Amino acid sequence: MSPILIVEDRPEDSEWLLKQLRKVCVSNPCQVVTSGNEALKYIDGQAEYADRTRYPFPKILLIDLRMPGMSGFELLGEIRRRRECKEILRIAVSGLDDLDDIRGAWRSGASFFLQKPCLPADFEGLIQRFPAYWERVLR
């Protein structure tokens, strides 16, 4: 199963993303971190994230682009440079539909861009485009 790491500084937005994933029956295990620096600690298995049974290496990242400290753009760039992260599906998420943000996300290494608020149809499109990453519960 492909673990999902949500990198989002606003709890209400991370809850919204989790809710939309459940609506489309995604059953991948999900973890939430609130900053780019915390995401790198998770990816590297450092500190509290050292237990890979409890915190498995993510195969999917949902990254908010606008966060305090390390931005989502910076995090995407760092992940793109890491050999061990080449197979991670990197989804940039932003409430802004500014063309410069979208272009910046692609340049930084995003595999896909979602505009907030993300709806079930948005995730259906992701599942269809990258089917190998997603696990679903049949109803």
Image (cartoon, rainbow, N blue to C red):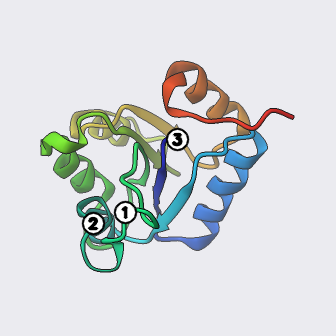
Looking at marks 1 and 3 on the same chain, the residue that comes earlier in the sequence is marked by 3
* Residue in front for this viewpoint, 113 or 62: 62
Q: Residues within 10 Å of mark 2 (few under 14, many from 20)?
A: some
Q: Quadrant of residue 92?
A: top left
Among all residues in the image, which is located at the extreme right?
139
* Disc 2/disc 1 C-alpha distance (Å): 7 Å
Residue sitting at x 56%, y 29%: 126
Q: Could you tell whether 63 is left or right of 73 in the image?
A: right
Q: Residue at x 72, y 38 (%)?
A: 120
- Residue 88: give x, y in percent of width and height: 34, 39
- Please name the residue that numbered disc 3 is placed on: 1
Residue under numbered circle 1: 52
Q: Mark 2 sits on what residue?
A: 45
Note whether 15 is above or below 1 in the view shown: below
Residue at (14, 45) in percent of width and height:
82
The local secondary structure at tag 3 comes to loop
Screen quadrant of the C terminus: top right
Location of residue 42 in the rendering, given as x and y in whole percent from the top left corner: 32, 65
Task: Name the amino acid type tagged 3.
Answer: Met
- Mark 2 residue type: Gly
Label count reads 3
Q: Nearer the viewer, residue 106 or 27?
A: 27
* Mark 2 in CB contact with mark 1 (< 8 angstroms): yes
Which residue in the rendered view is the most extreme toward the top? 129
